[in-house]
C-alpha cells in the first residue's frame, strides 16, 4: 500500500475521523459540504480523507481503502495522477484566476468539440449544477417555452427546477422534492419514469408544444447504473423532433467515462445540448454546456440568454481538464480497453463472491461504470432500484469498509473503476467480499 506516507496536511488533521466529525458537525451543517458524504443512509462515521494516490485513499485514522468512488467519477486515471498534478502546478505559478479569456480555454474547447460528437461550441461553468441550470435556461430561451421533462431517479444537480418529484396519481406536473423550491417552479417540471417511452409520449401528446426540452442522463448513474432500454433514447430523439423540443443529454457523469465520445458516441444518439462535469475538470471544479453553434450562440454575449461566472474557465480547472482529456483522447483504445477488462473482471469476481453467499443481486455495467443492486429483478427505473435490500447494503458497505474497500455510502450510487485499479486490487476486493458475514 502506498499512500501512507503523507504528513498531516493541516492543524486539525491527526484528530481521527470521529473527533473530526464531531467538530465538523458544530461548524458545517451535518459536518459535510454535500449531503451523501455524511453516511446518512448507511450510518456510522464518515471517513475524513487525508490523501489519495492511484486507486487508494487514506483517512484520518490512518486507514487505507481501495476506492471505487473516485470523487464520484472524475478520477478515471486514478487519484493524484502525476500528469494532472504537474499541469496544475505548472499553471498555478502564473496566477490562479484572471476573470479574462485565456489561451487554455480555447484549447479545452477544441478538445471538447473534437471528442463530443454533437458539440461545435462549449461554454464553461464551475460545476455540473451550473451547467444543467444554464442548459435549461438556454433551451427555454431558444424555444420560448417553459415546461420540460425529466426522469425519476435522474439527478441533474441541485437547481430548483430539477429538485422535483413526480406528481401523485393523474397529476402530470411535478412537486418540490425539497423545501425552498417554489410549487410554481416545480409545476413547470414534468416527471416520467426512466425507460418508459409511452409515458413520455403521452406527456408530449398533451404538452408537447409547451415543452422546451427533455433532460435525460443517457445512462442513468444516480440510481445505481441503469442503461437505457433499446429504443428509449431514439424514441426521445424522435419525440423532440416531432414537437420542436430540445433533447438534452446530461453527461456530467457519463461524459468521457463510458467512451471518449461520451454516451452519445457509444449509443449513437445525438442530443441537441450536452452538459459535462466531473471528468472534464480533471478533479477540479468545472462544468460545460456544449452543442451546435446555432444553439450555443443564443448564450450572451452573442445571444440574449444570460449566463456568466466569475471563476468560469478557471485556469487551474482548465489545465487539469486539458491534461486529462488529452490522455483520454490520444490513448483512448488502450485506456478504455483496459478499463473495460478490469471492470469485467470486477463484475465477474464480485458476482461469484456474492453467489457464494447466496445473495440475490443484479448488475448493470457500462464500461467502467457499474451498478450493483441487492434485488434479483432487472433494474430499469427508479422504482426497480428502490426494491434493493437496504439493510443488506448497509452490512455490505460497512463490511467492505472494514476490509479496506470503499464504495459509495448509498445504494443509489454508481461505482467507478479507474485505470489505477490493477487485477490484483480487484482480486483483493473480491476476496474481501468473500470474507463478509452477510
Ligand atoms: C454530479 C452530477 C451533476 C451535478 O454536478 P455537480 O458538479 O455536483 O454540481 C449533474 N448531473 C449529473 C448526471 C451528475 O452525475
Image (spheres, rainbow, N blue to C red):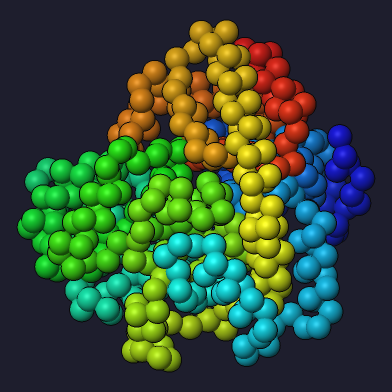
Rendered-image quadrant of the N terminus: top right
Residue 337 in sight in this render = yes
The location of residue 348, given as percent across then percent down, is 58, 21
Residue at 56% across, 34% down: 43
**Which residue: 34% across, 77% down?**
295
User: What residue lies at 69% left-to-right and 52% top-to-bottom?
Assistant: 331
> Is residue 4 left or right of 242 when viewed as pictured?
right
Q: Is residue 428 left or right of residue 178?
A: right
Q: Position of residue 268 (x, y in %)?
A: 39, 51
Left or right: where does residue 35 sit relative to residue 1? left
Q: Nearer the viewer, residue 31 or 60?
A: 60
Q: Is residue 190 shown to the viewer in this render?
A: no
For the image shown, how many numbered marks are present on the structure?
0
The residue closer to the viewer here, 268 or 39, is 268
In this rendered view, identify the residue nearer to me: 391 or 325. 325
Q: Quadrant of residue 298?
A: bottom left
The image position of residue 244, as x and y in percent, is: 18, 68
Q: Does 59 appear above or below 401?
A: below
- Is the C terminus in the top left, top right, bottom left or bottom right quadrant? top right
Image point 59% across, 69% down: which residue?
A: 111
Residue 231 against residue 262 in the figure, above or below: above
Quadrant of residue 415 within the rendered picture: top right
Residue 98 in the image: state x and y as whole percent.
68, 88
Amino acid at each position: 500500500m502506498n499512500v501512507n506516507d503523507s504528513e498531516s496536511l493541516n492543524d486539525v488533521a491527526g484528530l481521527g475521523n470521529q473527533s473530526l466529525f464531531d467538530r465538523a458537525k458544530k461548524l458545517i451543517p451535518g459536518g459535510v459540504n454535500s449531503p451523501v458524504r455524511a453516511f446518512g443512509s448507511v450510518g456510522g462515521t464518515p471517513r475524513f480523507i487525508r490523501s489519495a494516490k492511484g486507486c487508494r485513499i487514506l483517512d484520518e485514522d490512518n486507514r487505507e481503502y481501495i476506492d471505487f468512488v473516485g470523487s464520484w467519477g472524475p478520477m478515471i486515471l486514478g487519484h493524484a495522477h502525476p500528469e494532472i498534478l504537474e499541469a496544475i502546478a505548472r499553471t498555478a505559478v502564473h496566477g490562479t484566476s484572471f476573470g479574462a479569456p485565456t489561451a487554455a480555454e480555447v484549447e479545452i474547447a477544441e478538445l471538447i468539440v473534437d471528442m463530443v460528437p454533437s458539440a461545435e461550441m462549449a461554454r464553461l461553468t464551475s460545476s455540473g449544477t451550473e451547467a444543467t441550470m444554464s442548459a435549461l435556461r438556454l433551451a427555454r430561451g431558444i424555444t420560448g417555452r417553459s415546461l420540460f421533462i425529466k426522469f425519476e431517479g435522474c439527478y441533474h444537480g441541485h437547481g430548483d427546477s430539477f429538485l422535483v418529484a413526480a406528481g401523485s396519481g393523474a397529476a402530470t406536473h411535478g412537486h418540490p422534492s425539497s423545501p425552498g423550491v417554489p410549487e410554481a417552479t416545480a409545476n413547470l417540471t414534468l416527471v416520467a419514469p426512466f425507460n418508459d417511452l409511452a409515458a413520455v409520449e403521452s406527456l408530449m401528446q398533451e404538452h408537447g408544444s409547451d415543452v422546451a426540452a427533455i433532460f435525460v442522463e443517457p445512462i442513468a448513474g444516480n440510481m445505481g447504473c441503469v442503461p437505457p432500454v433499446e429504443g428509449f433514447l431514439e424514441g426521445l430523439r424522435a419525440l423532440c423532433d416531432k414537437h420542436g423540443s430540445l433533447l438534452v443529454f446530461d453527461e456530467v457523469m457519463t461524459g468521457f467515462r463510458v467512451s471518449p465520445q461520451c454516451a452519445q458516441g457509444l449509443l449513437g444518439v445525438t442530443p441537441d445540448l450536452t452538459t459535462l462535469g466531473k471528468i472534464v475538470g480533471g478533479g477540479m471544479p468545472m462544468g460545460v454546456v456544449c452543442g451546435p453553434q446555432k444553439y450555443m450562440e443564443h448564450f450572451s454575449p452573442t445571444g440574449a440568454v444570460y449566463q456568466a461566472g466569475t471563476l468560469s474557465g478557471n485556469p487551474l480547472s482548465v489545465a487539469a481538464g486539458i491534461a486529462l482529456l488529452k490522455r483520454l483522447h490520444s490513448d483512448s483504445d488502450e485506456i478504455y480497453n483496459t478499463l473495460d477488462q478490469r471492470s469485467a473482471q470486477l463484475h465477474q469476481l464480485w458476482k461469484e463472491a456474492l453467489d457464494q453467499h447466496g445473495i440475490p443481486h443484479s448488475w448493470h455495467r457500462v464500461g467502467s461504470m457499474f451498478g450493483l443492486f441487492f434485488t434479483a429483478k432487472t433494474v430499469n427505473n427508479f422504482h426497480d432500484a428502490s426494491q434493493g435490500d437496504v439493510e443488506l447494503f448497509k452490512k455490505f458497505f460497512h463490511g467492505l469498509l472494514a476490509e479496506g474497500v470503499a464504495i459509495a455510502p448509498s445504494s443509489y450510487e454508481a461505482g467507478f473503476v479507474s485505470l489505477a485499479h490493477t487485477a490484483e486490487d480487484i482480486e483483493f476486493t473480491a476476496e474481501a467480499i468473500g470474507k463478509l458475514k452477510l
